[in-house]
Structures are given as structure tokens and as C-alpha cells.
Amino acid sequence: MSDLKQELKEKIITQLNLEDIAIDEIADNDSLFGDGLGLDSIDALELIVMLDKDYGIKLTDPKEGKKIFESIEVMANYITKHRTK
Amino acid sequence: MEKVFINSIGSISTQRTFDNNDFLEEITTYEDNIIPAIEPNYKDFIPPAAARRMAKGIKMGVVAAKIAMEEAKLLNVDAIITGTGMGCVRDSEKFVTAILDNNEQFLTPTSFIQSTHNTVAGQIALGIGCKGYNFTYVHSSISFESALIDALMQLKLKEAKNILVGGVDESGEHTNAIHELIRHIKPEKINTNKLLQSNTEGAVFGEGANFFVLSNNKQNSSYAQLLDVKTFNTLPKSELTTNLVEFLNNNNLSADDIDVLISGNNGDVNFDNYYLELTEGPFKNTQQVYYKHLSGEFNTASSFGFWLGAKILKTQYLPSEISLNTIKSKGFGIVLLYNQYRGKNHSFTLLRQC
């Protein structure tokens, strides 16, 4: 699980071009949106594509994303349960 | 008809031009066939959150516009008009590559959103909160001049007071590879100081963003008066001189009135003969300069020539590195720019000291 969390942090930084943020600056329970990392709706779309491409998880209801992308911890738990690759 | 002045400039190019207090004091020479822009520290101009989705061309355009706005001491303008030949080509390459690599699946939105040609003008408008006229011309190597003509007409007819006009193009890896393949880029790496002696086909490609605030109010920061611009999609070499003389006559000028001819020579052995038509013809006794050994060739490289003309008229100084002949004018009152690319899309631009 900790490897997956590390992997998610690396992917978020690279794919969302968060050049000024280091991996150790993202805590597992930090909010990804709003006051936390400050991600926005375009980032949410990028994350939905990432889940599909890298873990085989298709989100059919975009509202699901709000819960799943709450934090690295929540994302990692969801991926562990639902991943197909 | 109102007069139109260039009230400020902002330039990011393959030379260190982003500091308006500097005028080519240190010229960078390259030994290459593709040359990159010298970039400022973007964090000094754009908040990191806004910059993270911007490719190089957008950053160059936004920052050049910001420098021009600051010099003109303006917080907003009536219109933003840009010219670009290839638009945001890096993001275009990115999402098209993603389509191919992922078999048309898993397409992410960011590069697609940022890939459109009008992204730069849009981002500038968002940055300064400009809800006015916003237009981008994509007309190959007369893209910048098309933007200039639009601004010139609006200002002359008092439809606007201050207009931000710019030319921007970024270099894209895949696009450059294609241009190398078809020999539009020189096959050999070349010392840019010896560009015009290369005697080979193709050009040295560059990139950059040059922005200007045009206004019908002259102010302390003003560089020059923009008199006229004319473009031609096609113009046979045999008709070049006649059309140029007619253009000058329409402005009550003749070739003898021109103090400096800024020529767009790019060292392409197949197409530099258009410039010879003028430099060895009606302007053989006029001081001549060139600039594409400094800026590289790109669809809006002529905006760098425009920047150069504005600088020469304001400072009354001309760096020796840009001289094309040995004739020296007594002063710089009227500057004529001529540019074309591969024998097409010709432009004449006339500037006067103000």
C-alpha cells in the first residue's frame, strides 16, 4: 500500500505539472482539492483518465471522483480494491 | 485619421531581449540549425498555479505581453490581437502523440485545451481581465502583420485607444523534425554569424514572442509611429519593386526617404534573392540591416524585426552585428521592413520616429 501511495504522489506531481511540490510535501491524508493541493476540475479529468489507463478502473459516474480523489489515502484504498491491472 | 504609436514593447527571443533597458548589448551566437528562446524566470511574472499548464509558447506570450503592459503603464487594453503561424504546437504534438500511442483511448484534457492557436490571446485576457475584442490571426508568415493591420485600422478609426498586439511561435520537436526532412530547416548546423554565407537551402529555425502596445496617444515611453502595413500572399519577384514603390508613394514617400531597410533574409539560397531585388535595387544606397541570424526563422519572426525597428527609432542606435551593408544613415527617421517566407506571404511595414 505504501508503494502505491508513493506511486500516486509521483504520478500526480508529474501528470499535473506540480513542479514546485515535492513528494514528501504531500501527506497521505491531505485534501487534493480545495485548501489542500488546490487541484481543480481539469485535474479531476486528468485523474479519471489516469485511473482508467494505469489501473483499469473506469469511473462511469463523475460524482464518484469527488469521494475517490479526497486524498492519497482514499485513492490508494479505492485502487487496491478495484484495480484490474 | 488618428496617428498610431508603438507605446511599449515586450520581447522574448533567442537573444536576451526581455529587459527593455538592454538593446542587444550582448549578442548570443549559435552553432546550430534550430535555436531556442532565452527565457526569463517565468515565476517572476506568472503565479506557479497558473503557469503549470502553460507550454513554452504560452509562457513566452503571456510574459512578453506583461512586459509591454508594464512599460505602457496600463492595467488593461481595449483589444488583444495576436498573430501565430503554428499556435501552441507543443501541446498539439503532445495530444496527437497521445492519440496515436494510446490507440485513441485515455485522452487527457490539458494539452488539448491548451493546443488551440488562440490560447495565448485568451490567457493574456484572463490574466488582465480584458473582456474586449480578442482575435488571433493564423496566416503563416504574415500572421503578425495581419494582427498589425487589424490594430492599425481600429486605432486610426478611433474604435480603440490602446491595443495589445503580438506575434508568438514556439518550436515543436516533431514539427521541426518534419521541417528538417523537407529541408525547410538547413541540414547542417551553422554559425549564425555566417548565416547569409551558408549558400545552402533552408533556414535556421527559432522561436519567440514579441508584444507591443499600440495607441493613438503618444506618451513618454513611445518608440515610434506605425505608418502603414501591407501584405501579399503571392507576389512575383518581378513585381516586388513596383509594389513597394507604390506602397511608399501611398505614404507620400520614395525609396530615398528610407533611412534603414530591415530585411528578413534567412540565408535560404533559394529564396533570399527576393531581398536582393530590393537591397541591390531601389535601396542599394540605403543603410540595410537583417535580424534572422539573431532571432531564427519562424512564422512570426517579423515581429522581432518590428521590435528591432522600434528600438532603432527610439534609441537612434544600431548594433553593428545587424548591418547588411556599410552605408550609414545620418539619423534614423523612417524605417521600412520587408519580409517573406519561401517566396510567399510578403509584408511591407513602415515606421517613423516620433
Image (cartoon, helix red, strand yellow):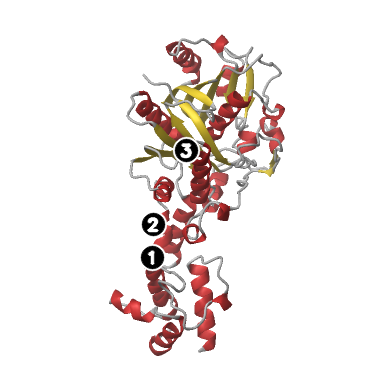
Label 1 and label 2 in one chain = no
The alpha-carbon separation of the residues under discs 1 and 3 comes to: 28 Å
Q: Is residue B214 visible?
A: yes
Q: Amino acid at mark 1?
A: Ile
| Residue B169: percent from left, percent from top | 50, 43
Nearer to us in this view, B100 or B244: B244
Q: Nearer the viewer, mark 2 or mark 3?
A: 3
Quadrant of the image occupied by residue B288: top right
Which residue occupies 36% across, 67% down? Answer: A41
- Chain under numbered label 3: B
Q: Quadrant of residue B43?
A: bottom right
Query: Is label 1 in contact with label 2 (beta carbons under 8 Å)?
Result: yes
Q: Which mark is residue B166?
A: 3
Mark 2, residue position: B113
Residue A8's tag is none
- Badge 2 or badge 3: first in the primary sequence: 2
- Same-subunit check for callouts 2 and 3: yes
Residue matched to label 1: A42
